[in-house]
Amino acid sequence: MSFLDVDNVSKHFGSLIAVDGVSMKVEKGECRAVIGPNGAGKTTFFNLITGMLPLTTGRVALDGQDLAGIDPSQRVKMGMARTFQITEIFPEMTVRENIRIPVEVQAGLHMSTRMPAHLRGPLNERVDQLIEEGGLTRIANRYAGELSHGDQRACEIMMALALNPRILLLDEPTAGMGDDETYAVARLIKRIHRESHMTIVLVEHDMRVVFNLADKITVLAEGRPLAEGTPAEITANEKVQSAYLGGEA
Ligand SMILES: Nc1ncnc2c1ncn2[C@@H]1O[C@H](COP(=O)(O)OP(=O)(O)OP(=O)(O)O)[C@@H](O)[C@H]1O
Ligand SMILES: [Mg+2]
């Protein structure tokens, strides 16, 4: 059985079928890209995997465990972390304060709980480590709201990693970014994938990022699975070219 096993999932919004019978098997340590035109159902597909939306049909399993009836916060505890198409950080807090929140949550502390003295040192070290790994040292004490899109995204990705996930889902991590920022975020994701062998599923529009990062690609169009394969296979796929890649050029 694959690490993430998505089997024939669908999502109906009234008469609109946003996701229509999609299956996807992601192996441990794989980096999978999900691509498709605007409105193809990619974010909805992520919401089905993470439990933010109930399934109309199908089944999602992580590491052999069926996730039916398991809510999003429980899925996070089981090792499923995600970032959003629109970055979700606390703009009025510094990068360090943002990263501290999931570190404390992961340690079983509620934000309002007083920090036990013996945890202070190890938690500070963990926050510092995440800041360094995310390349955020130079901006650790800046307010997150005043940073560039790329730095905000790096902060959000490190917040997700602070939860010690076993799988990381990234919805358009380079959305709205110029070339330099796109490159920096892609490099961070690549490093996370290579160094920690993290299983990653990412929705991405920038084909340079997709072909640079992904081991395999799943293509959605109008909610349906159009193709699946390696970057080379997807590039050569005529159905994909006419439905998607052709339209991009
Ligand atoms: N909560 C909702 N209620 C009703 N319709 C929805 C809802 N969420 C998404 N949709 C519709 O489902 C379809 C798929 O949307 P979705 O956001 O999943 O696409 P996407 O592939 O992520 O698009 P984009 O590339 O623009 O981010 C669209 O037609 C959208 O309008
Ligand atoms: Mg989307």
Image (cartoon, grey):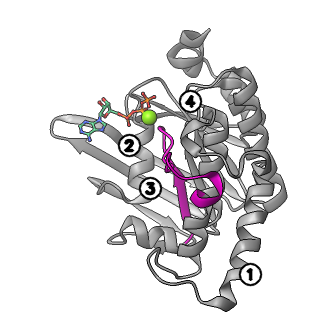
Q: Is residue 195 magenta?
A: no
Marks 1 and 2 sit apart, C-alpha to C-alpha, by 40 Å
Residue lying at 38% horizontally and 53% vertically, measured from the top left: 48
The kind of residue on which mark 4 rests is Ala
Judged from the image, the secondary structure of the residue bearing numbered disc 2 is helix
Residue 49, disc: 3
Which portion, as a residue range, is magenta? Answer: 79-98
Spot occupied by residue 233 in the image (x, y as percentages of width and height)? 71, 30
Q: Quadrant of residue 29?
A: bottom right
The residue that label 4 is drawn on is: 175
> Circle 4: is it few (<14), some (14-19), or many (20+) Cα within 10 Å?
some
CA gap between label 2 and label 4 equals 17 Å
Marks 4 and 1, the one that precedes in the sequence: 1
Which residue occupies the foreground of this view, 194 or 230? 194
CA gap between label 4 and label 3 equals 21 Å
Residue 173 shown left or right of residue 65 in the figure: right
As helix, strand or loop, the secondary structure at mark 3 comes to: helix
Which structural element holds mark 4? loop
Q: Is mark 2 within 8 Å of ligand 1?
A: yes
Name the residue that disc number 1 marks.
121
**Dot 2 or dot 4, earlier in sequence:** 2
- Give above or below for 105 relative to 151: below
Picture residue at 50% right of the left edge, 17% below the top:
243
Give the x, y percent position of residue 89: 51, 49
Q: Is residue 99 visible?
A: yes
As measured in the structure, the alpha-carbon distance from the residue carrying label 4 to the one carrying label 1 is: 36 Å
Q: Are marks 4 and 1 in contact (CB under 8 Å)?
A: no
Check disc 2 and report the residue beneath it. Answer: 44
Q: Closer to the camera: disc 4 or disc 1? A: 1
